[in-house]
Amino acid sequence: MVLCVLAAIPTILLAAVASWLSGHAEGEPMPVAVVDSPSPVVAPASAVMSLRRQAAVLSRRANQGVLAQSLSGLVDRLPGTSCLSVSVDGVPVLSAGVPSVIPASNQKVLIASAALSVLGDDHAFVTEVLGPDPVDGAIEGDLVLVGGGDPLLSSDWYPESSLDRFPVFNGTSLDSLADAIVARGVRSVSGAVIGDGSRYDDEWYASDWADGIAGIEAGPIDALLVNDARVLGDDYRGSDPGRAAAREFQRLLVERGVKFGEEARSGVASGGSSLATISSMTLPAVLREMLVNSDNNTAEMVLKEIGLKASGSGSRAAGVAAVAAHAVALDGTATPVDGSGLAASNRLSCQLLVNAIDRDRDFFEESLPVAGSTGALADAFLGSPVEGRLFAKTGTLGNPPYDRDPPAVKALAGVVASPTGERLTFALVLNAPTVNDQREYRPLWDLLATALGAHPTGPGVSVLGPE
């Protein structure tokens, strides 16, 4: 008799699901892109027969089916070279479109995931000053400012300068490092400040970037970078990041009363005592700035640090090799070319972005721009069902002329927090000739927001469970 009852439970509950679906979604076919991912069967510690437990499982599956169905309109309107993937609490629900797309700045999601894996949460970037020990306040020789790959090393004036749309935050104060040198009693230096960026190679701009990007959207990139290669009083970025950093540090020391005999320049340290050091905030805080501000320089420097840790080479080539290996570990594939996503030759899949976010979902939920509130999403999704609970990275790439390859890119990947506590992870990457026009991508974003914001709308446990 017990076996008969057990056998009847799924039949009864499935009939209830079918009845609910027929009453709420009649005439709406399920998209072929729905992922069939049944929950694993786990034997209970003791023999327990529970209609409510079975009802919870079936309710979850039914709601995921309704979610996939509600996204079918978006799937039907995807441009032919685009993709969409969605999971609920790490369980794949839908995957549609092509397996390889240009991600634009969604590349930074993959870079952040790889950095957390390769470098670890406790990683920090250390900047050091080397030189002879001061004698009666005087240094015979040079001070060497040695870069440790800190992408957020900044003078105190820089975040307030309004030179960029999104000012640096979570920065490392170069002023504090200057104060530490003065605190050592240094009053004069016979030589100059030397800027040493030799931790990384000297490829300051990625070769795959299109015209008009280098020095404007990103770069120059080196292991010593201060204020994104800007010096107070200059209108343009410095062409040599090490020299620009040395000039700015020497300027801060002069401002504090230190005298120098020579002009600042770039070079490589050849010894000396450690006179002062300063550490960045730990890696998650640095990556948070990268994601919220879509900071291209931070992404490129983190990529080189990944390469240094993975293979001993602080180069873009070593970094992209490590990121590609990380993609395989995430059950996906990618062809990374840079860290920022500025290169149109980057390739990855929507499912890889979802897998990356799901791997460190708490970090991404805390670190991505918030719909209607912060970063590039401050003015997006206002008044929509996902305002304040959609956390996502945007991506945009123009690539003129519009009628030739590569296509333009508009991307969005992140997490939506549902009212029931579930986490919906998604990636929508659109590749099409003029898709970065709001008239093209905003209707698709709205379809996505409506579907994700309404979840769950399927039958609940009260419908499927015992009365």
Image (cartoon, rainbow, N blue to C red):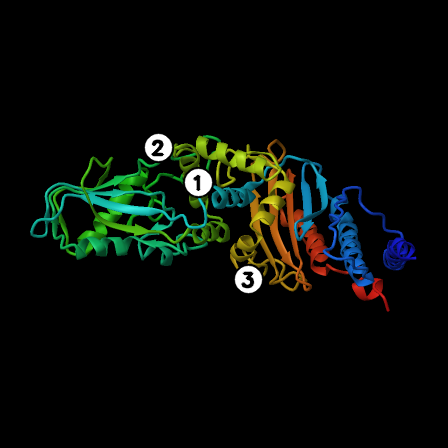
Q: Residue at x 81, y 61 (%)?
A: 50
State the separation of the CA atoms marked 3 and 2. Answer: 38 Å
The residue that mark 1 highlights is: 300
* Residue closest to the eye, 242 or 399: 242
Q: What is the secondary structure assignment of the residue under circle 3?
A: loop
Q: What is the secondary structure assignment of the residue under circle 2?
A: loop
Residue 417 in percent (x, y) is at: 64, 59
Q: Residue at x 57, y 37 (%)?
A: 329
Q: Residues within 10 Å of mark 3 (few under 14, many from 20)?
A: some
* Residue closest to the eye, 65 or 261: 65
Q: Amino acid at mark 1?
A: Glu
The residue that mark 2 highlights is: 202
Is residue 184 found left or right of 106 in the rendered image? left
State the separation of the CA atoms marked 1 and 3. Answer: 26 Å
Task: Check the image and name the residue furthest to the bottom.
Answer: 467
The quarter in which the C terminus is drawn is: bottom right
Is residue 25 found left or right of 36 in the rendered image? right
Asked where in the image residue 407 lies, by quadrant, the reply is: top right
Nearer the camera: disc 1 or disc 3: 1
Earlier in the chain: of badge 3 and badge 2, it is 2
Earlier in the chain: of badge 1 and badge 2, it is 2
Q: Which numbered tag is attached to residue 373?
A: 3
Q: Amino acid at mark 3?
A: Ser
Q: Which numbered tag is attached to residue 405?
A: none
Q: What is the secondary structure assignment of the residue under circle 1?
A: helix
Q: Amino acid at mark 2?
A: Asp
Task: Check the image and name the residue furthest to the left.
Answer: 136
Q: Is residue 368 visible?
A: no
